[in-house]
Amino acid sequence: MHNFQNAITSTQIAQIIKRRTITVHRWSESGKLPKPICKLGLIYVWDKSEVFKTLERLGYLTACNDENYGDKEGAQK
């Protein structure tokens, strides 16, 4: 069973990196992003902490462009 409290969708990732959703899927397939943890109907779901670590490494995520970045308590509420 997956923990969906720490989950992020491809649409949300696309908004963070300012790209289209198809780009998120392509990056995942090519290994630039981690693989999704599951698929719910047409929605792919990723582990948010894994995605944030990868986006930070790629330079797409900083404290100034995501309000939940580094918010450990937010995931537990």
Image: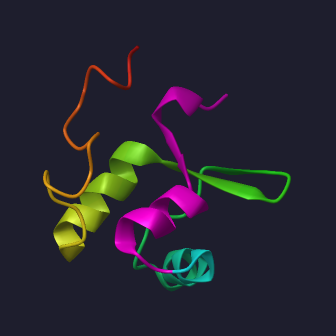
- Note whether 73 is above or below 49 in the view shown: above
Residue 34 appears in the rendering? no
- Note whether 74 is above or below 62 in the view shown: above
* Model colouring: rainbow
| Residue numbers of the magenta segment | 1-19
Q: Is residue 4 magenta?
A: yes
Q: Is residue 68 left or right of residue 48?
A: left
Q: Residue at x 22, y 75 (%)?
A: 58
Instruction: State the image coordinates of residue 15 (x, y, percent, origin top left).
Output: 45, 65
Q: Is residue 42 left or right of residue 38?
A: right
Residue 31 appears in which quarter of the rendering? bottom left
- Note whether 33 is above or below 77 in the view shown: below
Q: Is residue 11 magenta?
A: yes
Instruction: State the image coordinates of residue 1 (x, y, percent, origin top left).
Output: 67, 28
**Location of the C terminus (image quadrant):** top left
Instruction: State the image coordinates of residue 67 (x, y, percent, origin top left).
Output: 26, 43
Instruction: State the image coordinates of residue 3 (x, y, percent, origin top left).
Output: 56, 28
Q: Residue at x 46, y 80 (%)?
A: 19
- Choose between 33 and 10: the one closer to the eye: 10
Residue 56 appears in the rendering? yes
- Choose between 38 and 41: the one closer to the eye: 41
Q: Is residue 41 left or right of residue 4?
A: right
Residue 65 appears in which quarter of the rendering? bottom left
Total tally of numbered discs in the picture: 0
Q: Residue at x 31, y 54 (%)?
A: 52
Q: Residue at x 20, y 63 (%)?
A: 56
Pick out the residue farthest to the top: 77
Pick out the residue farthest to the right: 41
